[in-house]
Every structure is written in C-alpha cells, then in structure tokens.
Amino acid sequence: MTVRRTQSAVVAPQAPASYSVTDLPEVPRLGGLFAKGVAGSAGKRPKGEVRLPEVTYRVARVATAGEAAHLAAYQDLLGEPSSDVLPAGFLHVLAFPVATAVMVRGDFPLPLLGMVHLRNVVRVLRPVRLGETVEVRAWAQDARAHRRGVQVDLVAEVLVDGDLAYQGVSTYLAKGFTAPDGAAPAEESPREEWTAPLPTARWKLGAGTGRAYGAVSGDQNPIHTSNLGAKAFGFPRTIAHGMYSAARALAEVGPARRGEAYEWTVEFFRPVLLPGTVDVAIRYATDVAEGDAGAASGFVYDGWRSGKDTRHFRGTVRPL
C-alpha cells in the first residue's frame, strides 16, 4: 500500500489570536451537554452564512490520578494492553466533553443533532501517563463549504506542564448550511477504486457494542445505544461509534509499532450496523518521494463489512 504524506496532516493548528479564553471549573459531563444540544438543535436552521464563536474553552487542571478504573475499562474494551500510558483514543474521550461544550453554546450556529462525523487527525507528541495533571482546551474553526452543507473542525488539546502532548482535530458536516464566505465547495477528489484486501482481523460486534463504548466514553448518543433512537435518524438499527472502530484499529497496531509519539488518522464512510461483522486489514504503508523507491512510514488500516466491499473506514498510524 502506498500512501503519500500530506503537509496538512502534520501541521498543528492554533487557536486564532482573536479568540477569547473561557475557563471552565471542570470537565463537563456529556449527559448534560447532550441534553442541552438536543434542546438547542431545533432552533438552529439554515438562515444564512455560518459564523463560529471566537472562543477557546479551557480546563486548567484535570487530574488523571483517579482515572485508573476508567482507563482499565477502556483498555479492556478496545484491546489496548494494560499500561499507565493513556492511548490517543482515551485522550480523545478525556477531551471530547470540552469540545462538545463549544458545540452546544447558544451562539454555535450548527445543530448537535444530525452532525455527521467525517474524519479525525490526531497527533500524540509525548506520552501522557496516569497520575499526571493536564490542561484541556478546545475550540471550533474553519467552517467551510462542503457539497452537502458546511464542514467544521473541532480542535481539542491536552497539555502537560504547558507543553502540547495531544491534539485531535475532528471534522463534522452539517447538512444544508452555507459556509461563511459563501464559496462553492472545493472539488472533491474522485473516490479511488477499492477492493477489499486480505483481512488481518475479523471483529464480531454484538448488539450492545454501542452501549459498551458509550459506558467508557460517555457518548450515549441514542443512534449508538437504542434501536428506536437509531431509527429516528434513518438507521435500521444501532450503529457503532466511529471512534470505537478507529480506536480499536489503533489498539491493534499496538504501542510498540506506533511509538511514543505518533499521528493517527481516520476517515469514515458507511456506518457499522450492530450487530455486525467487520473485516479489518492493517498493513505497512510506504511514503514515496521523487527518486525514492519507498520507505516504511507506519501503517494503514481499512474496515469493511465482512463478505462485502462495503467500506466503513480507513486510516493511518504513523510514528512521528
């Protein structure tokens, strides 16, 4: 498999200097945030160009010492080995409520309900260990045109002693909205022809997979936990969390192969219906440069419906 590195994937965004900083006393609970997001979604309809709130939310001191049981439950569910190092998927879970708090603000113009999760780019710059006190901050940026509406990035960061340790950029789509500059969407690259490779793993996911990941992540969105909730959004039954699939693939690459500092990406295609069986292929990637026959540069992974060419996700894991 040949993969070309793109410069945009490794450049760390920074909150614009014009953004104000709002300090939160603690990491908010997702349950209350989702309730607020559901209540506020009804009034957020396409009315004109999207303008994002110019604010960074920050929780200055988040103690991880009390997260041992939570971390163990996460590691057990996702297949991460027992360790005091917090894997990138767990750091996403830790920071996700702060990013969600930005998304449920009254002046955040896009509805939480119905947002489509498109992709993630995550960079771990140094290990974060159980017991360290961290700073978490999050903001929204770069609302831009998509052929079906507006896509926006939610950026979440974890710092240790003032140094950036983790950064995750989650890209979401809000259908029917208009980008701030009114520009036409950039031309999308044509979908590559894809044939399922030889699988290296097969995941048999039970009907309760969404509830199990919801318990360790706090993400109890009903499309993942309730058939009735899933049907309300057009799915025949519950679907797996995208970050469950991505984090499980990251775990299968393993700490030794990804290293202490690494980049982890995922792009989502079709959702995984539960129960269901997903075939996964994890293999070496190569970085091809002019005059270079190709050098190993991490791993690429794909997930698809077992026995079909229905692709669910793809991504990369690359040591930095």
Image (cartoon, helix red, strand yellow):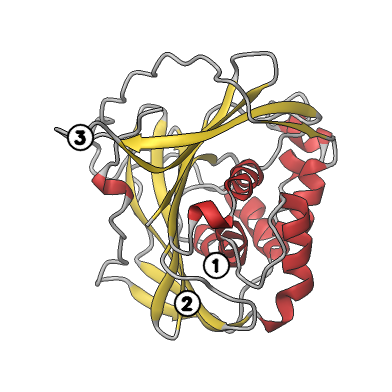
Quarter of the rendering containing residue 149: top left
Q: CA distance from mark 1 to mark 3?
A: 43 Å
Q: Quadrant of the N terminus?
A: top left
Q: Secondary structure at mark 1?
A: helix
In contact (CB < 8 Å): disc 2 and disc 1: yes
Residue 124 visible in the current orientation:
yes
Residue that carries the numbered disc 1 in the rendered image? 98
Q: Quadrant of residue 100?
A: bottom right
Taking 280 as reference, is 152 left or right? left
Left or right of residue 149: residue 290: left
Residue 219 drawn above or below residue 240: below
Describe the element under mark 2 as helix, strand or loop: strand
**Residue 256 in the image: x percent, y percent?**
55, 56
Q: Residue type at mark 1: give it.
A: Val
Q: Residues within 10 Å of mark 1 (few under 14, many from 20)?
A: many
Res. 169 image quadrant: bottom left
Q: Is residue 171 visible?
A: no
Question: In the picture shown, does residue 13 fall above or below 279?
Answer: below
Query: What secondary structure is found at the residue carrying circle 3?
Result: loop
Give the residue at x 38% y 69%. 55
* Residue at mark 2: 58
List the single residue furthest toward the left: 291
Residue 63 spot, x, y in % from top left: 62, 83
What residue sits right under mark 3 in the picture?
Answer: 292
Query: Is 157 or 97 nearer to us in this picture?
Result: 157
